[in-house]
Image (cartoon, helix red, strand yellow):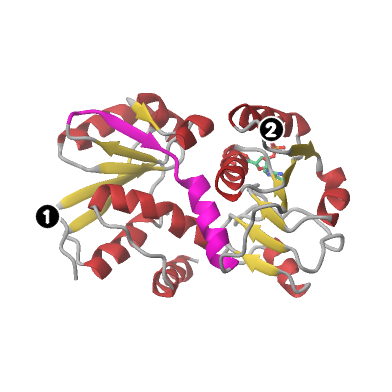
Amino acid sequence: MTLTGKGRIAGIIGWPVAHSLSPALHGYWLDELGVDGAMVPLAARAEDFSRVIEGVRLAGFRGVNVTVPHKEAAFALAHETRQAARLAGAANLLVFKPDGMIGADNTDAVGLFDSLQDALGGVAIAGKNIVVLGAGGAARGAVYGLQQFGHVAKITVLNRNKERADQLVAHVGKLQPDAVLQTGTFDEWDQAAADAWLVINTTSAGMKGNAPLALDLAPLPQSAAVCDIVYNPLETQLLKDAASRGHVTIDGLGMLMHQAVPSFEAFFGVKPSVTPGLRAALVKVLRERA
Ligand code: ATR
């Protein structure tokens, strides 16, 4: 057991926040690593966000994770920003520095990449063709991360609204001029799927309460893997269909666990590991809530 600090406190701020798995996730690592600390949920309405941040900063919190609807506001109030946060225009991590400065990062992109590496056993993503479904904030992080960390050959972004996909590609392309990025609507699925090595759903379709994407997986090569960043439900309809066709599937819990690693390290001073034990603990929480 390593005792790395006394009474370190961090928060997860959102509205609502009761559904967040962050307290359970960080709590697991705090116990496992014997760190004297806590991760507390902070329910804050949009209009109270900056006051709550100031309050917990002055109270001695090490920082906060940020969830819906505060990610843009968190980015806006930071004094120092990492590239991933600047690209997203949104932060999921604020670190309160001893000199009063607030640093912002966005760990979703690296979280997705590490989750893919983990699930695919470290097989190189470099040089592969990827299809990203969706063009919202989550897609932006995915495209950036795949290119930044994975050096992939080509990313095709398919979205209901093609204009949004074009905007995403234009934005990411400015930071990553070497990226080969294509766009289309779901009408281009058959063509995009034909040479895909990996498909990633970043849309909210398939999330609990939302109808799934009506995608026919037949055009996908048998060897292609399918990832869904949604984790509620853990096995989305897309993943069920993919599994029944024999594709390797990767659920959204992996990204959730991996995106938390840099936050835990920033708050509590020790790098935690993503393990089967952690996954089992979170699956148990999700089951209890279902
Ligand atoms: P986030 O920041 O979580 O990515 P978002 O910015 O609201 O959220 O983006 C949601 C994504 O899911 C978008 O790509 C959206 O498609 P549009 O841009 O065409 O609206 C996509 N999406 C949501 N519901 C969908 C559905 N039923 N079918 C297809 N795409 C859907």
Q: Say which element carries label 2.
A: helix
Q: Which residue is mark 1?
A: 6
Instruction: Give residue 33's mark.
Output: none
Please, is residue 260 above or below residue 98 in the view? below
Q: Looking at the image, which residue is at 87% across and 44% down?
A: 187
Residue 149 as seen in the image, left or right of residue 73: right
Quarter the N terminus occupies: bottom left
Q: Residue at x 60, y 66 (%)?
A: 120
Label 1: state its secondary structure.
Answer: loop
Kind of residue sitting beneath label 2: Val
- Amino acid of disc 1: Lys
Q: Is residue 109 magenta?
A: yes
**Residue visible at 80% across and 69% down in the picture:** 222
Residue 119 position within the rendered picture, expressed as x and y whole percent measured from the top left? 57, 66
Answer few, some or many: residues within 10 Å of disc 2's Cα (few below 14, many 20 plus, some between 14 and 19). many
Instruction: Say if 73 sits above or below 139 in the image.
Output: above
| Residue extent of the magenta highlight | 99-120
Q: Say whether residue 99 is left or right of residue 23.
A: left
**Residue underneath mark 2:** 169
Inter-mark Cα distance, 2 to 1: 45 Å
Say whether residue 47 is magenta: no
